[in-house]
Image: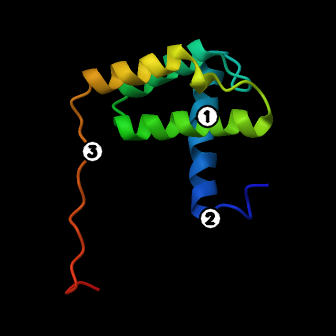
Amino acid sequence: MAAGAFSANTIRAWRADWEVFTMSCRAFRLESLPAAPKTVRAFVFECLGKGKKPATVRRYVSTIGRVHRASGVLDPTASEDVKLALKEMGRNSTARQKQARGLTWGED
């Protein structure tokens, strides 16, 4: 369904993100679909432990939620457990998103 609504790059990124999550679930013998909120919470902290940036982790969580909603099952990323994990990640992380330099008329 999403193939016509989204760009090929977006779908490719979602597939890659989902693969990261499912590999993590397999390693710990956990269900990826439907995933429990505590599974997603643990995944957030696992990613941070591996040095993933907060923006990357947020993208992973967004993809996990999208896959669950598209599959018609309960979205674990909407749970308070996951929301608090992301909030904790933001408070404890020293990594800041780098601001891109704005384009000017002289640039092509």
In 3D space, how far apart are the residues under numbered discs 3 and 2 (Cα atoms)? 24 Å
- Taking the spot 23% from the left edge, 84% from the top edge, the residue there is 107
- Does residue 1 sit above or below 18 in this rendering? below
What's the residue type where badge 3 is placed? Gln
- Does residue 45 sit above or below 103 in this rendering? above
What's the residue type where badge 2 is placed? Ser
- Does residue 102 sit above or below 10 in this rendering? below
Residue 51 rendering spot, x and y as whole percentages = 33, 31
Residue at numbered disc 3:
97
- Mark 1 or mark 3, which has the lower sequence index? 1
Residue 27 rendering spot, x and y as whole percentages = 60, 21
**Label 3 SS:** loop
The label number, if any, that marks residue 64 in the structure image: 1
Is 67 positioned to the left or the right of 37 in the image? right
Residue 49 shows in the view: no
**Which quarter of the figure is the C terminus placed in?**
bottom left
- Mark 3 or mark 2, which has the lower sequence index? 2
**Which quarter of the figure is the N terminus placed in?**
bottom right
What's the residue type where badge 1 is placed? Ile
- Taking the spot 43% from the left edge, 18% from the top edge, the residue there is 85
